[in-house]
Amino acid sequence: MEKANYTVTAKIPAVLNNRLEKLTHTLDRKKGYLIRRAITEYLEDNEDYLLALHRLETKGKVFSLEEIEKECGLDI
């Protein structure tokens, strides 16, 4: 089964584009490759955190460490 590819358009500041251009020339890679790598790494590093933050902001209840330890039977 062939993986689908999608085109995404984004405006970026000139300074960021200049950095990207320099890196493409230095590494002899295309912009698309570097952008895919950057997005992949960002999502791998931040996806769980961002989802947890969103749930916290929309659900509201916050538990203290002591409450969690007690609930899990870890309080000593």
Image (spheres, rainbow, N blue to C red):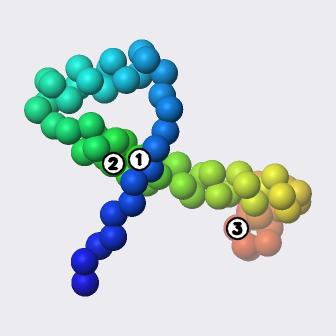
Circle 1: element type: helix
> Which residue type carries mark 2?
Arg
Query: How far apart are the two marked residues, 2 and 1, measured between alpha carbons?
Result: 5 Å
The one of 56 and 72 positioned closer to us in this rendering: 56
Pointer 3 with pointer 1, Cβ within 8 A: no
The residue most toward the left is 28
Q: Is residue 35 left or right of residue 8?
A: left
| Residue annotated with mark 1 | 39
Q: Quadrant of the C terminus?
A: bottom right
Whether 30 is drawn above or below 8: the answer is: above
> Which residue type carries mark 1?
Ile
Q: Is residue 18 left or right of residue 8?
A: left
Q: Which quadrant holds residue 72?
A: bottom right
> Whole-percent x and y of residue 46?
52, 49
* Mark number displayed over residue 36: 2
Circle 3: element type: loop
Query: How far apart are the two marked residues, 3 and 1, measured between alpha carbons?
Result: 38 Å
The one of 72 and 38 positioned closer to us in this rendering: 38
Image label count: 3
> Whole-percent x and y of residue 34?
28, 40
Q: Is residue 8 left or right of residue 35?
A: right
Q: Which quadrant holds residue 33?
A: top left
| Residue annotated with mark 3 | 74
Mark in front: 3 vs 1: 1
How many other residues sit within 10 Å of disc 3, few (<14), some (14-19) or many (≥20)? Answer: few
How many other residues sit within 10 Å of disc 1, few (<14), some (14-19) or many (≥20)? Answer: few
